[in-house]
Image: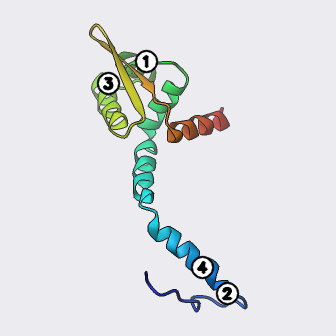
Amino acid sequence: MPELSTETCIRKNVDVPLLQRLQKQLLQKDNLEKLADLLTVAGNETRLKILYLLSQSSELCVCDLADITGMTVSSISHQLSKLRAYGFIGKRREGQTIFYRLLDTPFVEILKQLFILED
C-alpha cells in the first residue's frame, strides 16, 4: 500500500486512521472495475433506451424494439448482444422469434429505480 500523505492540502485536523481505512478499502475493491464496465455499457444512449423499454414491458422482440426506436433490426441486435454479455437481459425463443427481458439483478433493479425518477 502506498504511504499516506497528510500534506496534500491545508487543514487543521487530519483523521489519519479514517484516511488509512478508506485507502485500504479502495485498494481492495476489485469490483470497481466491473462496476465501471457495467456503467459504461448501460450508459450508452441506445442501450439505455432498450433497457428502459424492457423495464416497461415483460418482454419484447428485436422487431418490437426496432419499430419503437426507429432503428434497424441489425443495430438493435448488436446492442442486445452487448446487454446479454454483461448480464442485463435474458432471452426466450418462440419459433423463429426471440424475446428479450430484463434479468433480476441488483444493478438492473437500480436502473429500474432510476427510470422511475425520470417518469
Query: Is the C-beta separation of discs 2 and 1 under 8 Å?
Result: no
Tell me the residue that label 4 is attached to: 19
Alpha-carbon span between mark 3 and mark 2? 57 Å
Alpha-carbon span between mark 4 and mark 3? 51 Å
**Mark 4 or mark 3: whose residue is earlier in sequence:** 4
Query: Is the C-beta separation of discs 2 and 4 under 8 Å?
Result: yes
**Mark 2 or mark 1: whose residue is earlier in sequence:** 2
Mark identifier at residue 14: 2
Q: Name which residue type carries label 4.
A: Leu
Horizontal and vertical percent for residue 10?
A: 66, 91
Tell me the residue that label 3 is attached to: 72
Left or right, residue 19 beside residue 51 = right
- Helix, strand, or loop for circle 3? loop
**Mark 3 or mark 2: whose residue is earlier in sequence:** 2
Alpha-carbon span between mark 3 and mark 1? 15 Å
Q: Name which residue type carries label 3.
A: Thr
Which quadrant is home to the C terminus?
Answer: top right
- Helix, strand, or loop for circle 1? strand
Front one among 72 and 39: 39
Q: Name which residue type carries label 1.
A: Leu
Numbered disc in front, either 2 or 1: 2
Dot 2 crowding, Cα within 10 Å, few <14, some 14–19, many 20+: few
Tell me the residue that label 1 is attached to: 60
Mark identifier at residue 16: none
Numbered disc in front, either 1 or 4: 4
- Give me the residue at 64% from left, 36% from top: 118
- Give me the residue at 52% from left, 30% from top: 52
